[in-house]
C-alpha cells in the first residue's frame, strides 16, 4: 500500500515541480477497486445520469450525434463525488490528500465543478482527445490546481491512456498556437517540436496520476476490447478561490479533512 515517508514526499515534490506530474503507485487496493467497478457497471447500464456522451464531445472519432451508431456511448459519468460513499472515500483518499497538501503547500479542497467524473472509455466508439491544458477552461485566482486520475484498471497506450508533455506546466502559449476550442494546433512546427517530447503514462490498476492543470495532455482511443474505467477529481488550495459567476463557481468545494 502506498504510504510515502518524508524523503519520498520530497522526491515526489521535486519531480512534480520539474515535470508537472507524478504517479503514486498502488494507492487503491483490489477490494476497493472491485466495489467501485461494480458500482460503475451498474451506473452504465441502465445509465445513471448525469452523463456526457461520446457524441457530445465532438472529438476525432466521436459519433456525429446521439442518433448515430454509438451515439449513446457514455464517455463520462458526472458528479462522481456524490454517487456513493465509496466514491466520496476515493475522492478524499488520505494518502492522496497528504501528497496534494505537500504539492499545493497548504489546505486542500476538492472541486465539485471540474472533472469530478468517471471516465468510461469504451472500445468501438471512444474518441481521441487532442492536446490541451485543463486550466484554459477553468477560472480561479491562480492557475494552480492538480487533478488526480485514479486508474481502476490497467491503463495502456492500447486502451487510451493519457499522454503528457513533461514540463509544459511552466509554459505560456500564444493564442495563435491554439485552435478555437483551445487545443494545441498539431500542424504548427513549433507545436510539433513539443509534441515529439510526449510520453504515455501507463498505469497499473490502483495507481494514481497527479497532474498540474497547466500540463499539456492528450489521449488516444480505446483500441482494446474492454472498457477502461478511471475516476478523476481536481483539487485546489483553500485560499485559491474560484471566480464568482464562472463555471468553476457552480458548486462549493469540499475541504479535505486530512490535509
Ligand atoms: O481520456 C481522455 O480521453 C482524456 C481526457 C482529458 O484529457 C480531460 O478530460 O481533460
Image: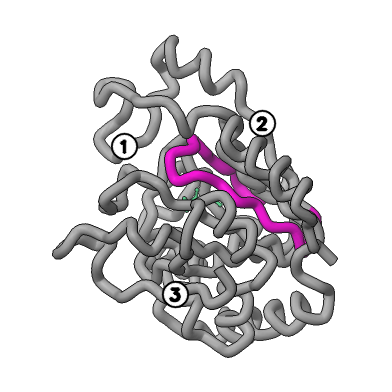
Q: Tell me: 71 left or right of 9.
A: left
Circle 3 — which element?
strand
Q: Kindly identify which residue carries mark 3.
A: 255
Taking 151 as reference, is 134 left or right? Answer: left
* Tags 2 and 1 touching, CB below 8 Å: no
Indicate yes or no whether the magenta region holds residue 17: no
The secondary element bearing badge 1 is classed as loop
User: Which is more N-terminal, label 3 or label 1?
Assistant: 1
Badge 2, how many Cα within 10 Å: few under 14, some, many 20+? Answer: few
Question: Going by the picture, which residue comes out furthest to the left?
Answer: 245
Q: Report the disc number at residue 199.
A: 2
Residue 13 on image: x %, y %: 63, 43
Q: Kindly tell me whether residue 71 is visible in this rendering.
A: no
Residues drawn in magenta = 204-222
Is label 1 within 8 A of ligand 1 (CB to nearest ligand atom)? no
User: Residue at the spot x=85%, y=66% of the render?
Assistant: 1
Question: Crowding near pointer 1: few (<14 within 10 Å), some, many (20+)?
Answer: some
Look at 42% across and 58% down and name the residue there: 236
Q: Is residue 118 above or below residue 130?
A: below
> Residue at the location (61% across, 45% down)?
162
Disc 1 target residue: 182
State how far apart marks 2 and 1 are (Cα). Answer: 21 Å
Q: What is the secondary structure assignment of the residue under circle 2?
A: strand
| Residue 52, disc | none
Amino acid at each position: 500500500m502506498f504510504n510515502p515517508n518524508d524523503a519520498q514526499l520530497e522526491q515526489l515534490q521535486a519531480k512534480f515541480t520539474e515535470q508537472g506530474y507524478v504517479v503514486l503507485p498502488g494507492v487503491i487496493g483490489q477490494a476497493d477497486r472491485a466495489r467501485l467497478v461494480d458500482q460503475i457497471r451498474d451506473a452504465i447500464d441502465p445509465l445513471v445520469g448525469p452523463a456526457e456522451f461520446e457524441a457530445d464531445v465532438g472529438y476525432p472519432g466521436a459519433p456525429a450525434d446521439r442518433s448515430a451508431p454509438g451515439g449513446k456511448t457514455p464517455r463520462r459519468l458526472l458528479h462522481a463525488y456524490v454517487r456513493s460513499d465509496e466514491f466520496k472515500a476515493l475522492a478524499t483518499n488520505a494518502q492522496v490528500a497528504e501528497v496534494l497538501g505537500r504539492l499545493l503547500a497548504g489546505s486542500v479542497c476538492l472541486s465539485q465543478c471540474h472533472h469530478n467524473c468517471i471516465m468510461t472509455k469504451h472500445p468501438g466508439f471512444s474518441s481521441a482527445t487532442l492536446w490541451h491544458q485543463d486550466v484554459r477552461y477553468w477560472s480561479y485566482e491562480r492557475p494552480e490546481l492538480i487533478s488526480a486520475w485514479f486508474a481502476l484498471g490497467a491503463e495502456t497506450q492500447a486502451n487510451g491512456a493519457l499522454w503528457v508533455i513533461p514540463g509544459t506546466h511552466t509554459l505560456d502559449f500564444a493564442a495563435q498556437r491554439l485552435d478555437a476550442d483551445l487545443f494545441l494546433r498539431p500542424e504548427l512546427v513549433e507545436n510539433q517540436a513539443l509534441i515529439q517530447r510526449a510520453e504515455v503514462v501507463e498505469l497499473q490498476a490502483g495507481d494514481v496520476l497527479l497532474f498540474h492543470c497547466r500540463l499539456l495532455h492528450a489521449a488516444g482511443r480505446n483500441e482494446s476490447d474492454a472498457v477502461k474505467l478511471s475516476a478523476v477529481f481536481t483539487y485546489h488550495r483553500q485560499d485559491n478561490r474560484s471566480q464568482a459567476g464562472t463555471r468553476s463557481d457552480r458548486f462549493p468545494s469540499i475541504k479535505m479533512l486530512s490535509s
